[in-house]
Image (spheres, helix red, strand yellow):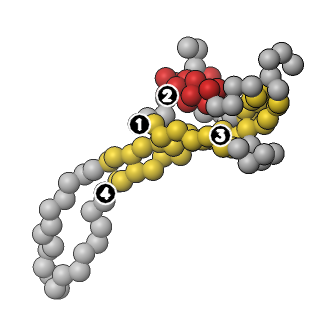
Amino acid sequence: MGNFSSVNLYFQDESRFGLFTRNGKSVTAIRVKPICVFQQVFKSTWISGAFSPITGDHFQLILPQSNADNFQLFLNNFSKENPTELKIMVLDNGKFHKAKK
């Protein structure tokens, strides 16, 4: 098993949390068109995480985007956690999980 003292299984996924404003319905008097200021806003952040159902160990990283470069950053940081553990990670079919980089 090389330099590893233990083996652990992890499941990885990412989620987007953000704000997306929409101009919804408003209540006014009959035949009065509502007047309101509206600004389209879309802001978000991504949380990537890996969780072990065996030990309960977990690792999360907040990232500005979900792409191949940030996924590599996630993997680099995750590999530094408990470096004597051989980590087996199950991924979904995300496009950036299979980047040619």
**Looking at the picture, which amino acid does disc 4 mark?**
Thr
- Measured along the vertical axis of the image, is residue 14 above or below residue 22? above
Q: Is residue 17 left or right of residue 32?
A: right
Kindly report the distance in space between the C-alpha atoms of the residues bearing marks 2 and 1: 8 Å
Kindly report the distance in space between the C-alpha atoms of the residues bearing marks 3 and 1: 17 Å
Q: Residues within 10 Å of mark 3 (few under 14, many from 20)?
A: many
**Dot 1 lies on which element?**
loop
Pointers 4 and 1 in contact (C-beta within 8 Å)? no
From the top left corner, tell me how far across and down residue 2 is, in percent: 83, 15
Q: Visible in this render: residue 47?
A: yes
Q: Quadrant of residue 26?
A: bottom left
Q: Toward the viewer: 8 or 100?
A: 8
**Dot 3 lies on which element?**
strand
Q: Which residue is mark 4?
A: 21
Q: Visible in this render: residue 96?
A: no
Which numbered tag is attached to residue 70? 2
Q: Which residue is mark 3?
A: 50
Q: Residue at x 62, y 23 (%)?
A: 98
Q: Residue at x 69, y 25 (%)?
A: 83
